[in-house]
Image: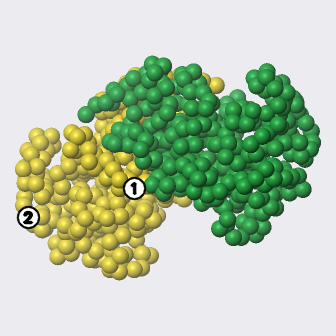
Chain colours: A green, B yellow
Amino acid sequence: MAHEIRLVNEADLRRAVHLDLEVIDCIEKAFAKLATGTVVMPPVLSMALPEVNAEVDVKTAYVPGLDGFAIKVSPGFFNNPALGLSSLNGLMVLFSAQTGLVQAVYLDNGYLTDIRTAAAGAVAARHLAPAVVSTIGILGTGVQARLQLIAAAKVRPAERALVWGRDRDKARALAKDMTAALGIDVVATEDRQQLVADSQLVVTTTPAKEAILGADCLHPGLHITAMGSDQEDKNELAPEILAKADVLVCDRISQCEKLGELRSALATRTLQDLSHVRELGEIVSGKAQGRTGDADITVCDLTGTGVQDTAIATLSLGKVKKANAGTMLVS
Amino acid sequence: MAHEIRLVNEADLRRAVHLDLEVIDCIEKAFAKLATGTVVMPPVLSMALPEVNAEVDVKTAYVPGLDGFAIKVSPGFFNNPALGLSSLNGLMVLFSAQTGLVQAVYLDNGYLTDIRTAAAGAVAARHLAPAVVSTIGILGTGVQARLQLIAAAKVRPAERALVWGRDRDKARALAKDMTAALGIDVVATEDRQQLVADSQLVVTTTPAKEAILGADCLHPGLHITAMGSDQEDKNELAPEILAKADVLVCDRISQCEKLGELRSALATRTLQDLSHVRELGEIVSGKAQGRTGDADITVCDLTGTGVQDTAIATLSLGKVKKANAGTMLVS
């Protein structure tokens, strides 16, 4: 009955799994499966721990056709920075979809989540942004600001990028790093309205609790992906932006209603009828129409789904096996 | 930022953690905490996978005062026996309650669940069974039949035990094993009504989907713990047993309404008003009265709670550290 389990730490995962087109395609396929209706994806298990200023989320999804399914635990302990620790940590466990036996434990401290989250941004950009993007705009200066820019540039090679952050020094550092990493001009700006005006593809990656973009910044041919809000108290886009979008897409409508930009738009009654809202999987699989022309304004609301975790965890097993990475434990 | 994580397999856990009074006391304290209202215990995340005849449950709880909290994943893949594998497997992950960092991964294949489940039976017996128990009756012949009998005997030393199972050979084998293990007479019987008539403490441990005991078996001075039902389609006790009990106790009322014996009693409208139903933690902590005298009939409905997982996972860390068990991984 004993079987082998592969235990992989963050360093090994960083060596074996990268934000590349293979990962983006893998996440795209997972979204397509989500639109077929055969995926089983329970609501997020969320445990708020106000006593220690923390929150723990558990996500999972069973995707028919994949060898495994992941269960991901994401603890967010927001007093950690004072201790010199990252707020976000966690792990993913990959189970066999045939037997339920544990296949692998990824002690990744959130690395695979970072990658699959950025990959979803690339999928949204690939299917919703205008065909030609000369400028990419990024709001925020954290890990996702970097990764979303890298991901966007893989599907929409741009001539330059603009970055904005509340902390100007961080924005400048990000611009410098990304100029070197991408080999294009990446410029920090203090004017986020102008950033949107000058961009065709914008990704918001902040933990904002009040809208940082108003509808007056919208212009024909703009795509915005808002991926910062994943909690009930977060909000990056003025609800009017969602109302004015020609195409409004969610990763999962039922989740965005609770945790995403859709929540604010519903709370303010700016949006009431959601019958026109599409899911990313429907766009990817051609079940629903995305952008109809160069002048459309498109918006994608991403909150992060269990299918992405299952997809990246399954793909990663092949990669770590090939790299002969990790420690084997019999149990 | 890297920290050490202890990875422990089933064999090491079986060597370090046993069903003893220390574990029973630990689980008892966890139930007492549950009654204080400061525990955070989200509803079970349950993912049904009919396509592969499986179900996956995730349980967790944050218990103030404990150094860690556990997240437990219990996959049940019911086609496994045909492959020579156990249906139930899974693992527990222990996180720091201060930082959310992973402290330990217990690749226990359900062993710690077995132990904490039996320990809850002992807690129920300690607080609800008559002071003197001469005969313990066990229905079922699986792992929990064995462990519940061991647990009951630790808090109510009996002269003999009776065991019943649908499979007579398994019941006889269980009786033989337990006679050797406990040093008391353990006898297999084919008459489960008589088993209850002759016992003061009965534990039902079967996966029955229809009641295996009717109310006609009740007698003064009887305590029944029903721990087999933990799913929406399971049922061991006729609803009239719950209605006729002088004291009716659940591990968690909100969970038993969905998954336990309480579910059947509510579905048949045999029980409608639950205002007299108590939780085990209330009894343990003295907030509610349990048995009032030797003649009371008491019933306890156990479905298994996240506080038990957090309690056993936290206790186990000390034990495996002391035993220097497991593999350390830096991540």
**Label 2 lies in what chain?**
B
Q: Is residue A53 left or right of residue B8?
A: right
Query: Circle 2 sits on which residue?
Result: B191
Indicate whether B28 appears above or below A141: below
- Residue B283 position in % (x across, y down): 40, 62
Front tag of 1 and 2 = 1
The reply, left or right, for residue A123 in relation to residue B8 is right
**Quarter of the C terminus of chain A within the rendering:** top left
- Amino acid type assigned to the residue bearing label 1 in the image: Ala
Whether residue A37 is visible, yes or no, is yes
The residue tagged 1 is: B48
Q: In which quarter of the image is residue B11?
A: top left
Mark toward the start of the polypeptide (1 vs 2): 1
Position of residue A70 measured from the top left corner of the image (x, y, whole percent):
47, 41
Residue ID at (29%, 63%): B234
Q: Nearer the viewer, residue B34 or A29?
A: A29
**Tag count in the figure?**
2
Residue B65, horizontal then vertical, whole percent = 55, 44
Question: With respect to residue A183, does B179 lie above or below?
Answer: below
Front residue of A200 and A261: A200
The residue tagged with tag 1: helix, strand or loop? strand
What amino acid is labelled 2 in the image? Answer: Asp
Residue B226 location, quadrant: bottom left
- For the residue pair A189 and A59, the one nearer the viewer reads as A189
Who's the residue at 23% across and 62% down the image? B208
- Mark 2 lies on a secondary structure that is loop
Q: Are marks 1 and 2 in contact (CB under 8 Å)?
A: no
Q: Can residue B305 be seen in this view?
A: no
Residue A73 appears left or right of B174: right
